[in-house]
């Protein structure tokens, strides 16, 4: 059975521990990239959750791997704790996540 992995900053990892997913807690984008590539090679995971701040710091080749990956589904999520700043773009973020997951654009009203 496929597992779920979260690659996140240490401050955020506590919340994921309660959900039962496996966690790779890392303070640096370089280590996050290593964990991501190791997870892709292992083929143990069906879903990989990664902080989108890490993703933005990856090189173009690694970002392309993330965008093209179907299994595992790699889900970049904004784990920054400042919700008000992200509220304006939350609908577009959800739309993009759905489009990546199912391959269709859905308009949220």
Image (cartoon, helix red, strand yellow):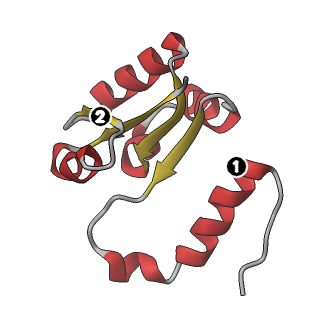
Numbered label tally: 2
Q: Residue 50: name its quadrant.
A: top left
Q: Is residue 67 above or below residue 34?
A: below
Instruction: Give the class, few, some or many, for how many residues have Cα within 10 Å of label 2's Cα (few <14, many ≥20).
Output: some
Q: Is residue 55 above or below residue 84?
A: above
Q: Is residue 63 above or below residue 1?
A: below
Residue reaching furthest to the right: 104
Q: Residue 74: name its quadrant.
A: top right
Which residue corresponds to the image point at 69% horizontal and 59% vertical from the top-left? 98
Measured as percent of width and height from the top left, residue 31 is found at: 28, 25
Sequence order check, earlier mark of 2 and 1: 2
Which residue corresponds to the image point at 81% horizontal and 64% vertical from the top-left? 105
Q: State left or right for residue 52 relative to residue 98.
A: left
Mark 2 and mark 1: span between their CA atoms? 22 Å
Q: Which residue bears the numbered disc 1?
A: 101
Helix or strand or loop: what does disc 2 sit on?
strand
């Amino acid at each position: 059975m496929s597992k779920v992995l979260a690659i996140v900053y240490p401050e955020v990892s506590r919340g994921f521990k309660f959900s039962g997913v496996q966690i790779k807690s890392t303070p640096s984008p370089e280590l996050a990239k290593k964990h991501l590539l190791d997870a892709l090679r292992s083929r143990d995971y069906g879903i990989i959750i990664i902080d989108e701040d890490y993703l933005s710091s990856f090189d173009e080749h690694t970002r392309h791997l993330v965008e093209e990956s179907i299994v595992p589904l790699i889900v970049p999520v904004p784990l920054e704790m400042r919700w008000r700043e992200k509220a304006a773009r939350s609908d577009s973020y959800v739309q993009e996540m759905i489009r990546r997951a199912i391959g269709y654009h859905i308009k949220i009203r």
